[in-house]
Image (cartoon, helix red, strand yellow):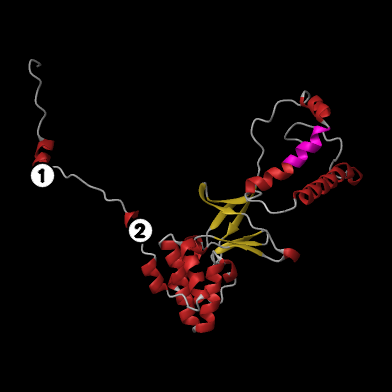
Amino acid sequence: MDDYDMKGSRNNRGRAHENGSVEGPHGHLKRAIEDALLLRGSRDFETTGEYRAFPGQVVSRRNARNRERIDAERAVPGPLPGRRSDEFEETLVRVTTTGGFTLRRVFYTVPSRLVGHRLRVRLYDDRLVVYAGTEQLMTLPRGHAGPGGRRGRVVNHRHVLPSLRRKPMALLNWVHRDGLFPRGAYRRAFDALREGLDDRETCRRMVDLLALAHDHCCEARLAAEIDRGLDAGELPDPELLRKRFPPKPDGIPDVGMALPPVADYDDLGAPAPHAGGLS
């Protein structure tokens, strides 16, 4: 209210008896959205944009009945503030030896080179923007805690892969291991390897599979091949799979360089000729 130079008349701090003027309409809107979902017949949305647009459509229909009152309000407010209000909360976090940080009961992984560093995080409704000083490092999807306050996790296997390559056995008892696998096929592969091989070989093969998916940019295709092999009763072998998913030969461009004759360098130190007719 201070930001927009307005005075509250319905829901002021410290006056609990005024809360109903906001909580009542809020409850009505939630019930209207619930009814709209029932009429829609499904709670599944194809994209995030479609999911965000749905409650907006419900709000627009409800606001249509108050159009005259809203138009009367629009003529009254003064100019907007000089700068846009912040859409985020900012906090400081420290990256621990587990390769990430915890914020709002959710664990986020970051590249292992940031272990021990203090980072500044801007927390939006759908993402986290991470800074080191004033330099923006990355954007992470926002996670949420589970039911009953259970800790959530947002794990990116690319962040921890360099550490796992050095110490594959760390995968066995890593507390956030279940969130590491990018697709269900990789989780199936880990479970099948544990049943058929010893722990050391299981971890080595699993890290090699993740590295293959990352290095050769074949995460989805490799997952489909792993599923096919597991359905046939075959354990995934990174060495055989590496032959089926070689690196793309056109990934490195062929850059041609024309080198000048060596004699041309002798002219660099020669004095420039005087122009004819000029003194």
Quarter holding residue 79: top right
Q: Which residue is mark 2?
A: 248
Please name the residue shown 26% across and 48% down the image. 255
For the stretch drawn in magenta, what is the main secondary structure?
helix
Task: Judge left or right: residue 161 versus residue 176.
Answer: left
Q: Which residue is mark 1?
A: 262
C-beta proximity under 8 Å, tags 1 and 2: no
Please name the residue shown 82% across and 26% down the image. 68
How far from the left and from the top, in percent, is residue 41?
75, 52
Which residue is nearer to you in this view: 274 or 55?
55
Secondary structure under the numbered disc 2 in the rendered image: loop
Magenta-drawn segment: 57-65
Which residue is nearer to you in this view: 45 or 130?
45
In the rendered image, residue 58 lying in the magenta stretch gets the answer yes
How far from the left and from the top, in percent, is residue 123?
63, 50
**Could you tell me the amino acid type at mark 1?**
Val
Locate the C terminus by quadrant. top left
Decide: is 61 above or below 274. Answer: below
